[in-house]
Structures are given as structure tokens and as C-alpha cells.
Amino acid sequence: MSLLIAIRGWSPDQWVERFSKAAHPRPVFDARAAFDPAAIRYAAVWKPEPGLLARLPNLRAIFNLGAGVDALIGDPTLPDVPLCRIVNADLTARMTEYVVLQCLMYLRQVEPYRRLQSERRWQPIDQPAATDVRVGIMGMGVLGQDAAEVLVRLGFRVAGWSRSPKAVAGVETFAGEEGLAPFLARTDILVVLLPLTPETRGILNRDLFRRLARDGVLGGPFLVNAGRGGLQVEADILAALDDGTLKAASLDVFETEPLPASSPLWAHPGVIITPHVAADSTPEALVEGILANIALHEREGRLNDVVDRRTGY
Amino acid sequence: MSLLIAIRGWSPDQWVERFSKAAHPRPVFDARAAFDPAAIRYAAVWKPEPGLLARLPNLRAIFNLGAGVDALIGDPTLPDVPLCRIVNADLTARMTEYVVLQCLMYLRQVEPYRRLQSERRWQPIDQPAATDVRVGIMGMGVLGQDAAEVLVRLGFRVAGWSRSPKAVAGVETFAGEEGLAPFLARTDILVVLLPLTPETRGILNRDLFRRLARDGVLGGPFLVNAGRGGLQVEADILAALDDGTLKAASLDVFETEPLPASSPLWAHPGVIITPHVAADSTPEALVEGILANIALHEREGRLNDVVDRRTGY
């Protein structure tokens, strides 16, 4: 094999260094420098320059360095070779941390207590039990199922919604268009881990927010989006927060990233912003997995975690 | 049986109502009203008036409505009958929520991201994995063990310290005076769930803070005290935060409660304050358990969750 590293938006240096060390003595090329396109068999990429992959005549597989492949699939020049996404215990653990943290912050009323502290006021607030709080997870793949498992352990009432039916221990599951309304109607904290596809683009809009539970013991509903920015309509989130259709939102992803400094989301008191770091990938955790997948392909002609381009995940 | 409810500091009304309903047709008396001291067999109490219990000649057992019994044991007039504390799945779940929330807030750098948000700055911060963060739990009873289990599931490196040796799956355990130094030296986030006893009073002091790990990947150490306020020396916490011996502290309990408005803890940027609500008891969750314990005593002459007055827990 010879491997091309094509990364934009992040610093490629540590990735190139780590891939080079782990793949040694096989060659690893940096897309920023000169290389022979015909020599490349595999490419590990993050938001590569459109058209770059089409210029590699002997490319056998593409490895995306994050969980979401929407940007790649949206490139009409993407060559017709297997596209693999990252399914990795470290990434899964980090996403679960983020989701559990947001749910606990809403359950345990971190913001109201912070305000009381700033006023030097000792005032216990009625504390519902987790067993009375309904979390609904949209997207029940590896990430959704792992987060659900910890939320169930903590006592939350967890439901999951996915395109096709899934069975998950301790989780009430809903599927498809007909499952969406009852799923939303029983959800106080909506956690979104969907892939971005033509069907899911803009799904987090005013109409959907209106269908969430309005009788929650925490006075929600709350939105947690750690999927993709393209899932959400930010103008609708702001309007829903302002008129009480949503109580608060934790957003790790945005329509435009970096989120422009002019966005009113930054200063909205109901919004918790993180800069697309919910499940940040690190070279340590991912390089070995990709090289193992390449070795599997060379040895047996098959690959793990191949994306279905029809569904987009 | 006839049961006396003696509660100060909280509103007794919902407790009296719920005990009356659940114990019906047996009599339940409110200590604020008139009652015949000789008729009382059992007492459910929270910070009762000192001397009150000594005036009940036929008292058979006392049930404390919270986890900590230090205030009762400190009353020299406390009659020599079994004293039971609350060991309850709801209380345990709430404490685990609080502990996991604080650990995740430090791991996922909630405060630094909040500051960046207030400045409208999109700036990812290096994110260590939970597997590189060492949580140390002082007090490995029911509460400590339950919190440890969830922290282990999330990937944290968890150790426990207790007076007597304990074996807990996935947790490195230390015990006694000789185990304290190595336990502290490997701890980035110190979680304190100790009972308040003559040996533990003031244990959270400058000397102990100096022995915590100084090489943590999060730049800690961090203190989380959800045990008892009497465990901590607040002047030492403030000094340690100011000179960097501690990076931050989550405090649910205080030397004086309510925490006086004049305390500098309220406004310290490194302190997260909650008003002794980490594992708030509710009548719903506790009444049935106490009545079941009384029934056990009447039927078989024994009681669950009796406090050892020598150790104080």
C-alpha cells in the first residue's frame, strides 16, 4: 500500500507524522507536497480539496477521519471506491461523555444554580429524579446506542428513533416517519446524532420542536445536537427559544463552521456552544484502526465500516 | 407502632402527610403539635431539637432522613436505641448523578468553553481522554461504589480510599493512613463522600491538597465535596485555589449551612456551589423504605442500615 493524507481545516502535521511512523516502512504522502497520483492506493482524508481523489487512478479505498461523511458524499467527483467512516471506541466514548454531560446539566439544573450562586443565594430547587425525565435519541447507530446505555444506567427514561427499526435493551424504540410523532411527544431532552442526508437536512426545525413534550418535569424541552450542523435550522432554534417552544439548546455543530462571530446563538442565554468537539478524533486513537482496516483489505479483500452511499451512513 | 416525625430545616408538612397516608391506620405524630411521649415507638427525624428524643421513654429506633448522621451522634442526649440511616436507591442515584456531572464538567472543560462562548470565540481546546484522567473517591460505601461504577463505565481511571480495605471491580483501592499518600498522589479529581467523624473532621485541608497529583492532563487537581461541610477547611480551599494548589472545587456542603452571603466562596471563579442538594431526599423515595424497616423490626426484631456509633457511619 501507499497512503495519501489529505486534510484541510485541521493541522495535518501530527496526522502525517503518526501515519508515517505507524505504517513504516510503507510510504505515506502528504497531499500538500508533491506525490505520484498513480502510486496512491489508499487515502485518509478530512474535507479534502474537491476533485483531488478523482485524480488518483489506482485508489482502492477512502478513509474519512471523522464520523460524518456528508461532505465527501456531496462531492460529485468522488471516485467509486469503498468509503469507510470512523467507528472507534475512543470516538464513541467521547460522544457519550458529551451527551451524558448535557443531559445531566439539564437534569441537575446547572444554569439555575449558577445564577443563584452569582446572587449569593442559598436556595434549593425542586429536583426531579432521572426516572421522570425522558431522553429521546435520534440516530441509534453505534454512538446513539452507547450513549443510551449510560443514560439508562443513570436512570433516565430513554427512547431511540431511527430510520429502520432497532432493538436496544432498556430503550423504547421508534422507527420511520410514523414513529416520529409518538417519539417526539414523549421526549423532554432531544439528543440528535443523525447523519446528514437529503432526508435529514433541516429536520431540526420549528415544526419538529413544536411536537416535543410540553409537560416535562424540568419544564423543557431541551435540544442537544451533536450530529451535523446541516440538520438544524438556526433561525428556528432561536425563534423557538425566544417563544418558549424550546427551553435550552446545546449545540456542537452549526450550519456554518466556524460559527460566525455575528451569530446571535453565541450570546443567547439558552444556548451552550462548543466548537464541533463533542467527539473530537485524535491521531492516537484512529491511526491504528485505519491501518488495520487497510491490512484487512490487502489480506482478505474486505473492509470494515464501509458507508452505504444510498443512505449516506 | 406509632411514629413521630421531627424535622427542622426542611418543611415537615409533605413528610407528615406522606407518612400518615402510607402508615394508615397506625398513628403518625408531628413533633410541632401535641403528642404523648410515652406512645412513641419510632422516630423519623432530620436535625431534631436536641433533647427531644431523650424525652421518649418507649422509643425503639430512630430513622435519620438523610445519609449523614453526624448531627445526631453529636447530641449527647441521644437515647441508646438503634439509629438507622438512609440507604436508598433514589438517594444513591442522585449522588451518582452529582458526582458524574462534576467529573464530566471538569473533563469536558465546561468553564473554559463557557468563557470562549462569552467572547464569541470558536476555539477547540485539546481534549484528554477520560482514560487519562484519574478520579479518586474518598469514602467507598454504597454511594462511593455506585458513583465509581458509572465513572469506570465512562472510561475514567478510578481509585477509592476507605478506612478499611474494600475490593471493587475496576477500581484501584487504598485503605487507612498508609494508603492515603499513594491514593492522593495519583488523583486528579478528588471526590469526597466521607462521613463526618472525629477522624475525618477538617481532613480536606491545605496539607491534603498539597499531596494531590500535580501532573494531571487537565491541569488539576480538582476537589468535589458532597460529603459533609465539616470535612473541609474553607479558608484552606480558598488559599489553595488562589495559589494553584487546587484548580477548581465543586462544593455541595459547607462549614456553616446555609453558606453565609459574606463567604468569599460564592464569588470565587474556581468554585461551583450547590446548596446541599447533591442527593436530596424526597418523601416519595424514602417513606416506604422506612416503614418497611419498621415492619422488619416488629416482625423479626432486627433493622437494616443501623449506624455503628463507634465509627459514626
Image (cartoon, coloured by chain):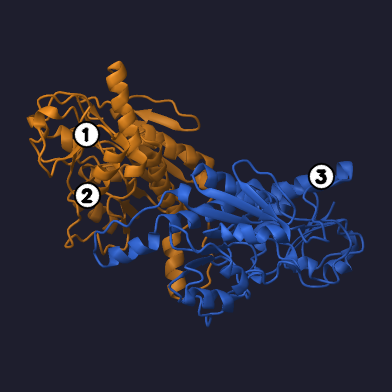
Chain colours: A blue, B orange
Quadrant hosting residue A232: bottom right
Judging from the image, mark 1 belongs to the subunit labelled B
Around disc 2, counting alpha carbons within 10 Å, would you say few (fewer than 14), some (14 to 19), or many (20 or more)? few
Q: Residue at x 62, y 57 (%)?
A: A183
The circle drawn on residue B90 is none
The Cα atoms of the two marked residues, 1 and 2, are separated by: 22 Å
Left or right of B260 on screen, residue A2: right
The residue where tag 1 is placed is B27
Q: Is B162 placed above or below A254 here?
A: above
Q: Are marks 3 and 1 in contact (CB under 8 Å)?
A: no
Q: Earlier in the sequence, mark 1 or mark 2?
A: 2
The circle drawn on residue A295 is 3
Q: What's the residue type where badge 3 is placed?
A: Ala
Judging from the image, mark 2 belongs to the subunit labelled B
Badge 1 and badge 2 both on one subunit:
yes
Around disc 1, counting alpha carbons within 10 Å, would you say few (fewer than 14), some (14 to 19), or many (20 or more)? some
Q: Is B147 placed above or below A256 here?
A: above
The residue where tag 2 is placed is B10
Q: In front: mark 3 or mark 2?
A: 2
Q: In front: mark 1 or mark 2?
A: 1
Q: Nearer the viewer, residue B107 or A179?
A: A179
Q: Is A12 placed above or below B194 here?
A: below
Q: Nearer the viewer, residue A69 or B208?
A: A69
Element carrying mark 1: loop
Q: Is B18 placed above or below A238 here?
A: above
Q: Residue at x 85, y 72 (%)?
A: A76
The Cα atoms of the two marked residues, 3 and 2, are separated by: 65 Å
Q: Nearer the viewer, residue B224 or B20?
A: B20
Q: Are marks 3 and 2 in contact (CB under 8 Å)?
A: no
Around disc 3, counting alpha carbons within 10 Å, would you say few (fewer than 14), some (14 to 19), or many (20 or more)? some
Q: Nearer the viewer, residue B228 or B22?
A: B22
